Amino acid sequence: MSLTHDFTKFLLECEALKFGSFTLKSGRQSPYFINAGSFNDGTRISALGKFYAHTIVAAQEVGKLGDFDTVFGPAYKGIPLAVTTSMALSEESGVPMGYTFDRKEVKDHGDGGMFVGTQLRDGMKVLLVDDVMTAGTAVREVVPKLKAAADVEIVGLVLSVDRMEKTKDSDKSAVQAVEEEFGFPVLSIANIHDIIEAARELRNDDGSALIDEERNAHIEEYFAKYGA
Ligand SMILES: O=P(O)(O)OC[C@H]1O[C@H](OP(=O)(O)OP(=O)(O)O)[C@H](O)[C@@H]1O
Ligand SMILES: O=C(O)c1cc(=O)[nH]c(=O)[nH]1
């Protein structure tokens, strides 16, 4: 069984894939939503870290991703992702891997500053992790923040789910646009097409299809409007 298939099953088991009507950061109204807040216990978040670590190591083995010194997750939902990924990588390699996250607001007392964890220094290599990419706004916000802190090299971005959508102002996929703009690879554990395909096979407790005709029509409509 592939990593994507296992991950899709894991998402569904954790109820991290929701159906309904959701307003996204981009303002898009989506009939499905990936809720990283559903990885809400030690077992789930630890399993998630292992999925990230496998994706990262597999990409490194085929030369798609370089080495790095710290895993950076943007606040808020990126924070546990960075921690669990660095834990899984440290366990797997036996070498401590750093993690770093930002604050959404500046702290002016105690340790102060905007970043927590491994501090960013000139020449450091950083791997970004986030839950999803939709239009690519979050990554555009976070890259300048990191670059302003130190002359770091961002080696790549790893997502739980690539929603495979267009940018706000072009027909290019958000992932492709970010790769071209910033020059680093964007990888994901799974993409939304694989996930929806797997969900189409599933049934509710009463035997009805998890994705019924009406839900399917909304999904197809959304894919046609925003899919890249
Ligand atoms: O590609 P985009 O269109 O930017 O959308 C995806 C981003 O939106 C969400 O973050 P949000 O800012 O809602 O933050 P949160 O982690 O505080 O929930 C999500 O966690 C991604 O970071
Ligand atoms: O685009 C978003 O804001 C978004 C989409 C999604 O599936 N999950 C999430 O947390 N945010």
Image (cartoon, rainbow, N blue to C red):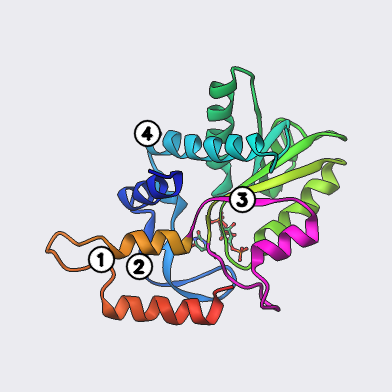
Asked whether residue 50 appears in the rendered view, the answer is: yes
Q: Check disc 3 and report its element: helix, strand or loop.
A: strand
Would you say residue 69 sits in the magenta stretch? no
The residue identified by callout 3 is 187
Mark number, residue 19 = 2
Secondary element at tag 2: strand
Badge 1 marks a residue whose secondary structure is: loop
Q: Pointer 4: what residue?
A: 43
The residue range painted magenta reads 163-191
Residue type pointed to by label 2: Phe
Q: Residue 142: where, in percent of width, then height?
A: 72, 53
Q: On the rendered image, what quadrant is the N terminus found in?
A: top left
Question: Within 10 angstroms of label 3, few (less than 14), some, or many (20 or more) residues?
Answer: many
- From mark 4 to mark 3, how far is it between C-alphas? 24 Å
Q: Is residue 21 above or below residue 187?
A: below
The residue to which callout 1 is attached is 210
Q: Disc 1, disc 2: CB below 8 Å?
A: yes
Q: Quadrant of ligand 1?
A: bottom right
